[in-house]
Image: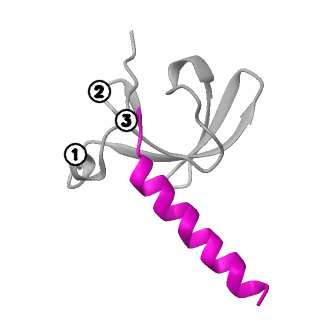
Amino acid sequence: ILLMFRQTESQLKGRSDMKKFTVDRIEETKAVLECENGDIISLEKSVLPKNIAEGDILYFEEGSYFFNEAETQKRRDKIKKLMDSLFE
């Protein structure tokens, strides 16, 4: 059984045994994730945290995926800032 829950950025910081993923897209029952090294994987949504969305940051550790809310928000803010600067 996989357990999925949110972890804070401070709980995740400095962990070298974890892999970081960005949710690229959601396709019906699957989610396509991009690993920080550029690899792409497709997983059943049922093994991921509930209510994930495109652009969310997930970490994988010890057989479980964890949503990182702080890093996801930081990424969204960065993208919004870039988009705003393009359309000024």
> Residue 38's x, y, as percent?
56, 54
Q: Earlier in the sequence, mark 3 or mark 1?
A: 3
Q: What kind of residue is marked 2? A: Glu
Based on the picture, tell me whether residue 68 belongs to the magenta stretch: yes
Q: Are marks 3 and 1 in contact (CB under 8 Å)?
A: no
Left or right, 7 with respect to 67, comes to: left
Query: Mark 1 Cα within 10 Å, few/some/many (few <14, many 20+)?
Result: few
Q: Residue at x 22, y 45 (%)?
A: 11
Secondary structure under tag 1 reads helix
Q: Residue at x 75, y 85 (%)?
A: 86
CA separation, marks 3 and 1?
Answer: 10 Å
Q: What kind of residue is marked 3? A: Arg
Q: What kind of residue is marked 1? A: Gln
Residue identified by numbered label 1 = 11
Q: Earlier in the sequence, mark 3 or mark 2?
A: 3
Q: Is residue 81 above or below residue 56?
A: below
Q: Which mark is residue 62?
A: 2
Based on the picture, tell me whether residue 56 belongs to the magenta stretch: no
Q: How is the image coloured?
A: one colour
Quarter of the rendering containing residue 41: top right
Query: Mark 3 Cα within 10 Å, few/some/many (few <14, many 20+)?
Result: some
Numbered range of the magenta stretch: 66-88
Left or right, 26 with respect to 1, comes to: right
Q: Residue at x 29, y 27 (%)?
A: 62
Residue identified by numbered label 3 = 6
